[in-house]
Image (spheres, helix red, strand yellow):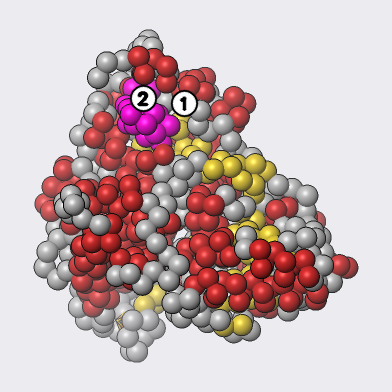
Amino acid sequence: MGNETVAVHERVSDPASLQVLSKAGVDCVETCFDRADLQKVTCKFGTGGICCRICHMGPCRITAKSPYGVCGANADTIVARNFLREVVGGAAAHSDHSRHLVLRLKKVAEGQGNGYQIKDSRALYRSAKAYGVETQGRSDNEIALELVDLFLAEFTAQEELLKTLSLAPEKQQAWWKTHQVAPQGIDRMIVESMHRTHMGVDHEYRHLLLQAFRTALADGWGGSRIATMASDILFGTPVPVRSQSNLGVLGKNTVNLLVHGHEPELSEMLAVAVRSPEIVQAAKDVGAEGVTLAGICCTANEILMRHGIPVAGNFLQQELAIVTGAVEVMIIDVQCCMPSLPQVAASYHTRIVSTSELAMTAGATHLPFNGDDPLESAKAIIKLAIDNYQNRDPQKVVIPSETKPLVAGFSVDAIKYMLGGRYRASFRPLNDAIMQGRIKGVVGIVGCNNAKEKLDDYINTLTEELIKQNVLVLKTGCAAIASAKQGRLTPETALDHAGSGLREVCEAVGIPPILHMGSCVDNSRILEAATEIVREGGLGDDLSQVPAVGVAPEWMSEKAVSIGCYFVASGIDVILGHPFHISGSENVSHFLNEQARELFGASFHVCSDAKQATEKIMSLLDAARGKLGIDKKAERKLYDMKDRRALDV
Ligand code: SF4
Ligand code: MSK
């Protein structure tokens, strides 16, 4: 059950989590950390990827004595098939999320918004331009309808390649075609991959792995990219916003409502509903001072970036939030919501409310979100929380005092604006700083937490080291929340923790050295930023030449497998904090960790700790800089906003 103090220190790193995990021990509440202990003896067939249960002649396990499954599949085939199925899981999750947003946009464009609207016409025009949709003399709804048709066709296209691929640099597009990994429709890729991994179909490991990259590209340059565009059109393109993070954001005397999961439609409405006078009054009527809405995981990132709603925690804090005893309702939808939540909630008064038609959890109250009356749907859940406030047991409440300030909301558009101002918005100053050596390169640190590892430790140690070495860090998902909880998502971080070159740039522009770019589906924003760097010129003409690396230090989800694959296929090296389940096949490991470089100019690397990762990243950035001929520091003036305004264009 509960953990001893020493063990608690080995599991989590921030003071709020330490305090609440200790409380879980006192309250005799089992958490993922306890269950991780019970699962410690992991199956070597599972970790090696050499257990096949694809047909019912099996399960088959590969050993030295039995190197083939009943059908004759060897380790290479089995490992590659299992890997491809993980990519499918991740790509499907992102892309289904995306489809829901596109269908919402369709309803809005058809005049059935029911409270939703096109909030950001500029985002609509940006996307329309990218796809060649005529905007002249047309209403937003007309433009959106044509765009929606294009988006939906990206899911259903049978023979045509994804149009969204054209948002990538031309050289990347050419490589994808050459290596036959340019995807057709997103749905087709997912179905085809499931077909190819059925018993007795595709057995050649390289062929299967190329399909993994193709399916992942349908995610990164398809489903995820479209999700980001649709959510920006519907809910607004994020701009820098201040807020607070960690479990201390829960109110002592307010009704506390947490949103957890991924899809932003309901949480957008909650952000509106929570401010309505009727709700505030209802909360006061039960003796509360008001309602506190906060988030966990990527739903948190969505409403943080667009509304400044505070973040209560990341993936491994979902159970801890309930253990505070101060949460009236936790709303869950899809992805990363642990099935244990109702069991943890049973020790307190918290109600777990599942809201997606796709997802039910035993012990949760199922209130499917009604998109036809979204505001009322949101209010009904808030009222449930208000009613539950009276059941809070003050004896069981411990809210840590720990909160940290943050600035989030760095969409590519916002970064351009920060770098160049309204009339000169561009990545030019960033490219210049990289070319001059003030910034060594750009690293995307993304992904989850993992109960096998100390919460946030690898992510934050690596981040600290990189900014010290003048690397600009872009973050999404739970990795971004890790920095938020450490108080590092503020411009002041540049003054106190960044190397002198990075600090100089951050000070001139007024940005933190660690930029929060969104949820895990928003890794597409990192691809977009890298593409902007290429377009701006001077740092190569494809993504593999840019001094840029992706890292998933504490990853756990199939989505991370897909993200890693679309980064590598896009020419960006990826460091993993722990390996994929592929060690059972030397050929598969060699292909992903070495040979992929011959195809895409990038590959995977496994670094088990932050120190090793830092060294690897710096060597990759140095190598890229050497190839570009920018490895010697040039003494050039860094233009600040005033200088740039004085320039003639
Ligand atoms: Fe065994 Fe082959 Fe069936 Fe897999 S597909 S379970 S290796 S017989
Ligand atoms: S929520 S996928 S734990 S980032 Fe996107 Fe966090 Fe990973 Fe889920």
Q: Residues within 10 Å of mark 1 (few under 14, many from 20)?
A: many
Q: Which residue is at a point 46% across and 26% down the rendered structure image? A: 509
Q: CA distance from mark 1 to mark 2?
A: 9 Å
Quadrant housing residue 544:
top left
Quadrant housing residue 432:
top left
Whether residue 63 is situated above or below residue 246 in the rendered picture: below
Residue 509 - label: 1
Magenta span? 415-434
Please indicate, yes or no, whether residue 615 appears anywhere in the rendered image: no
Quadrant housing residue 225:
bottom left
> Which three-letter amino acid code belongs to the residue tagged 1?
Val
* Side (left or right) of 151 relative to 397: left
> Which three-letter amino acid code belongs to the residue tagged 2?
Pro
Viewer-nearest residue: 501 or 211: 501
Count of numbered marks: 2
Viewer-nearest residue: 352 or 598: 352
Q: Which residue is at a point 61% across and 82% down the rendered structure image? A: 365
Task: Determine which residue is flagged by label 2.
Answer: 429
